[in-house]
Image: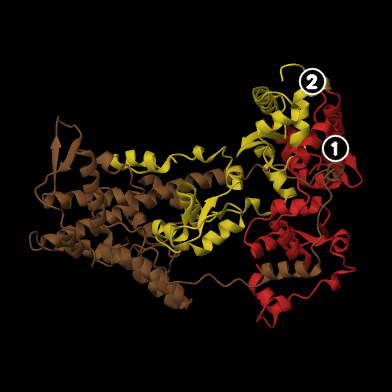
Chain colours: A brown, B yellow, C red
Amino acid sequence: MSTMLSEDQRGQTATGAPDSSPETGQGKPAGGFRLALANFNGPFDVLLHLITKRELDITEVALAEVTDEFIAYLRELQQRSLEAGSDGMKVLDETTEFLVVASTLLDLKAARLLPRGEMADEEDFELLEARDLLFARLLQYKAFKHAAAFLGERYETEGSRRPREVALEPEFAALLPELIFSIGPERFAKIAAGVLAPKPEPITEVGLDHLHGANVTIAAEAEAIAELLAAHGAMDFTALVADAAEHLVVVVRFLALLEMFRQKVISFEQHDPLGPLQISLAGESDFDADAVLDDYEGKGEVDHE
Amino acid sequence: MSEIAPIDQLPGGLESGLEAVLMVADTPVSSARLAEIFEVPVPRIAAALESLASEYDSRDRPRGFELRRVASGWRFYSRADYADFVSSYVLDGQTARLSQAALETLAVIAYRQPVSRGRISAIRGVNVDSVVRTLLTRGLITEYPEMGDGGATLYQTTEYFLERLGLGSLEELPALSPYLPGVADLESLDSATYDD
Amino acid sequence: MSEIAPIDQLPGGLESGLEAVLMVADTPVSSARLAEIFEVPVPRIAAALESLASEYDSRDRPRGFELRRVASGWRFYSRADYADFVSSYVLDGQTARLSQAALETLAVIAYRQPVSRGRISAIRGVNVDSVVRTLLTRGLITEYPEMGDGGATLYQTTEYFLERLGLGSLEELPALSPYLPGVADLESLDSATYDD
């Protein structure tokens, strides 16, 4: 995790420093945590940075622990947008991006504050899913951030070399086949107009893409698992996710397995110690997709999916 | 092709012939294409190119240029040591840096191509419209010829992307999985997902 | 200028430095310009260039390239001995027609000249480097004598372009407005939209 921080500082991304950061100068008492606003690439970036700052591994961290700082960041973001008086669309866009993550974090924090056992099972489960989805996204984001660092380094070092890209020597240019260029001024003007006409600005949507990414649901993945098991008999987890196109599917399939186990649709078997866990249909009951739909589909703020 | 080729009858032979062709090339030239031009087998071309490249590098005086294999072929480059002087001669956007946002977006496209803006946004958690435009203008990405689901435009990296990063092919991109810590199951999934 | 120049501290020294700059130079470079770049006196530049040129010619193996002095300065050329091979490279896959990309780029240059590659890229939304080279090679455009902002090279169309289009002068280029429905004040709109 410590490498993340150094990268952030090398690139012009994140320099949110604990304690003495002078970047924002928003008149907060010295010593408080502040972030260099606008240096971050969205909510995942901020979250990753907050986790890094606490030297927590995102595979272990309880996200609830960084919630307060995250919410504080969101507040400053809004404050600054107001001050800058920038266009409302952009502010709205940015805010929704952060809200998705913030609401998930708040849920997690609330769960920690509640005494164990007071929450209904389904809510526990929703929370588990919310957290895991957030983890999955963070892991993915982190992986791409590292890949970006590799690309950035290559881009930088390669920039110090230049390819030879020169116009053809006249003797050889003269050998080229005579140009067929019988287009006429009118058609030429049409082409020019086509290129020079102002392009319609791409619709500035309030970014909803982050809310509706790939359509991955527990119900659908449970169905996929049941089909696979019906066709192949017992399988291990690796085989069950072999066709998954992204991490999120793996995570959701894992959650679906838990749900299916709870409903006694499947059973687990381990033949030798530390051996692969074999999963097969238990045959005791069918999977109740509706129960899952009820459980998860209403959960708008974590439904990036 | 085993007897004496025309190029062998010229002073300097194949190596000088290769130098002459590469001197006018404005894109990387593959050994296969050079083999056709000089009517000699590909392995002989490859060996001659390697030998030229190392001659430029390791002579008592390293040359101001180097011969490198990038994207789909070979090409002359100015040597990095002299970058300061070269850039004071050539003023253009080549050295303009890419922002962190542009690099992250480029990474997602490189590993997930062809990919829609919506999918990139989902992974990065932010709107990427303007960054994608920048990458298009820089020639690092281009539109994929086919539409994605629901008519979304898909993007892919270009040959220039490989050239600009000094990569021989997309396979030379490091695997994404080592960057994902401690998730064994995801690890094995990665090889299935990303190495395509 | 008589003490040790920065270039003397690099491996290869001035000669390799000159090779680096000339390898990427698109047009001949004068010794005066090279003297500025390397911060050494013109006579030293001239001597180094002469020595390089004769090294390429007279080594046991004549190089596939030569360094020649033409009116405006020095430039690398492919050596005439290998012209057959170079021609077969150049002619391979050449078409007699301009691609759509080339036509669009030419159109932007014709209606917005003098214009930089950066601006053309911004208007077309793609990298135009190689297309601009093609248009230069085909003699349809040429470099504008003055530099643009920040030292960018500007391009304009040629007499040959007008001939091919059957026009006597640039004023005869048809107005664009009839082809742009609903845009009353094109000129101001254009500059507002594309100025970068």
The amino acid type of the residue labelled 2 equals Asp
The percent coordinates of residue A215 (x first, y second) are 33, 59
| Of labels 2 and 1, the one closer to you | 2
**Residue sitting at x 37%, y 66%:** A97
**Residue sitting at x 53%, y 59%:** B132
**Residue B8 marker:** 2
**One can see residue C112 in this view:** no
Residue at the spot of label 1: C44
**One can see residue C20 in this view:** yes
Q: Check the image and report above or below for B135 versus B70.
A: below
Q: Nearer the viewer, residue A240 or A27?
A: A240
The percent coordinates of residue A39 (x first, y second) are 46, 61
User: What is the chain identity of the residue bearing mark 1?
Assistant: C
C22 relative to B127 in the view: left or right: right
Q: Check the image and report above or below for C34 versus C83.
A: below
Where residue A77 sits, quadrant-wise, is bottom left
**Residue sitting at x 52%, y 41%:** B170
**Residue C187 marker:** none
Q: Which quadrant does the C terminus of chain A fall into?
A: bottom left
A81 relative to C51 in the view: left or right: left
Q: Nearer the viewer, residue A176 or B28?
A: A176
The amino acid type of the residue labelled 1 equals Arg
